[in-house]
Image: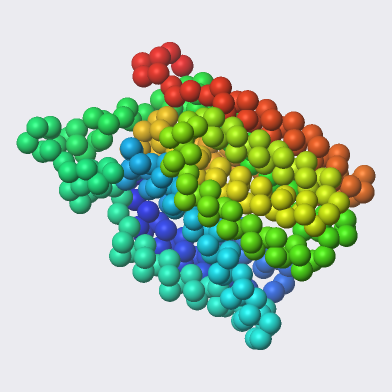
């Protein structure tokens, strides 16, 4: 659907569902409703991997400047945390948590729907443009080739892509990264508190760390041009491995701050690099369909990570027994990433 119709209507519908669910949480609060609400957001891909709508779409508009464009796109998440958290906290402190949910829902309705319907388009060829802002040379090239973008990079179909070793190597590397990070995502703050770090310092670290994520996003295009796409991705994964080591070993507020900064940098960078990698390997025409296969597999694996971490902590009284092995999993992910290469056109699966 994303490849055929673009993100315009899909994102507006998904944003509407998410907004209405958030508003409903201001009125209903049984446990079953809360679970159902988050399931609904997950079904429209707005809970967690929201980049499913934006990343493949932006990849269709850029080839030469794709890494730079997706890096700039990834600024949105940390910027939202920097400005959104204090605003929502102010509403909750002054008007209660019900009002907080309703404000978040109404804000989504007022921002996501108009922006989606007014500004988003499927691909540049739909409005007579070419990727990267280049001017089409219709008098020199057949219109069909311009529309397909085949003059720039080979366009793999989903069926062709999933038959290549490179697709599964890349998907496995990303899946291992997501699995590891999901095992720590919701447990980091309680872990820091249990090790004696002041909650106010943790809040300061979490908020200020988003500035590091913004810096990484702004400079991602330059980083890719200097280091290379696969090497930069592997380095980003190893930075997350360092974050795990710091988190498990945390003994001072400084270690907590460094862990927060490395987490934000790596997590945000990896989100942008994924979109760049898949589009660079398999082209932009079927980017949505190809990413959906990898994303679905990763979500299934990642869903088990947090419950597994919780069970390990309940049984052993510590996250050490799962987070130390995750360091090894991240190193394996980095190895798969650094040895990955784009598939050769016409090569046997």
Drawn side of residue 96 relative to residue 295, left or right: right
- Specify the farthest residue to the bottom: 94
Q: How many marks?
A: 0
Render colour scheme = rainbow
Drawn side of residue 95 relative to residue 118, left or right: right
Drawn side of residue 320 relative to residue 136, left or right: right
Where does the image place residue 71, in percent across and percent down from the top left?
46, 48
Q: Residue at x 82, y 45 (%)?
A: 248
Q: Quadrant of residue 240?
A: top right
Foreground pick, 44 / 327 = 327
Foreground pick, 236 / 94 = 236
Is 349 situated above or below 10?
above
In this view of the protein, can residue 290 be seen by the observer?
no
Foreground pick, 333 / 250 = 250
Q: Quadrant of residue 158?
A: top left
Where does the image place residue 74, in percent across and percent down from the top left?
49, 52
Drawn side of residue 67 relative to residue 248, left or right: left
Where does the image place residue 271, in percent across and percent down from the top left?
54, 45
Q: Residue at x 48, y 70 (%)?
A: 108
Q: Residue at x 63, y 30 (%)?
A: 334
Where does the image place residue 141, in percent across and percent down from the top left?
12, 32
In this view of the protein, can residue 12 be seen by the observer?
yes
- Specify the farthest residue to the top: 348
- Specify the farthest residue to the right: 316
Q: Residue at x 72, y 65 (%)?
A: 203
């Amino acid at each position: 659907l994303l490849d055929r119709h673009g993100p315009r209507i899909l994102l507006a519908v998904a944003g509407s569902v998410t907004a209405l669910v958030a508003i409903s949480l201001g009125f209903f609060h049984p446990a079953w409703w809360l679970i159902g609400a988050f399931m609904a957001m997950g079904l429209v891909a707005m809970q967690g991997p929201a980049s499913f709508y934006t990343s493949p779409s932006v990849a269709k508009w850029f080839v030469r400047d794709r890494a730079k464009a997706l890096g700039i796109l990834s600024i949105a998440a940390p910027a939202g945390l920097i400005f959104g958290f204090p605003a929502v906290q102010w509403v909750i402190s002054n008007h209660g948590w019900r009002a907080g949910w309703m404000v978040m829902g109404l804000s989504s309705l007022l921002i996501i729907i108009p922006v989606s319907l007014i500004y988003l388009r499927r691909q540049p060829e739909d409005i007579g443009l070419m990727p990267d802002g280049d001017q089409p040379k219709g008098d020199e090239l057949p219109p069909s080739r311009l529309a397909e973008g085949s003059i720039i990079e080979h366009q793999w179909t989903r069926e062709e892509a999933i038959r290549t070793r490179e697709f599964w190597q890349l998907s496995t590397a990303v899946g291992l990264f997501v699995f590891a990070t999901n095992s720590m995502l919701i447990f980091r703050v309680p872990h820091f508190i249990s090790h004696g770090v002041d909650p106010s310092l943790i809040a300061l670290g979490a908020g200020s760390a988003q500035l590091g994520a913004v810096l990484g996003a702004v400079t991602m295009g330059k980083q890719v041009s200097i280091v290379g796409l696969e090497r930069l991705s592997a380095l980003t994964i190893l930075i997350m491995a360092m974050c795990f080591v710091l988190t498990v070993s945390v003994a001072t507020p400084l270690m907590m701050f460094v862990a927060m900064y490395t987490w934000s940098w790596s997590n945000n960078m990896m989100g942008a690099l994924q979109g760049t990698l898949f589009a660079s390997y398999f082209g932009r025409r079927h980017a949505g369909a190809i990413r959906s296969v990898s994303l679905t597999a990763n979500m299934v694996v990642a869903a088990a990570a947090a419950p597994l971490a919780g069970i390990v902590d309940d049984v052993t009284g510590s996250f050490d027994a799962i987070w130390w092995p995750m360091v090894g999993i991240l190193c394996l992910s980095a190895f798969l990433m650094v040895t990955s290469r784009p598939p050769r056109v016409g090569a046997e699966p």
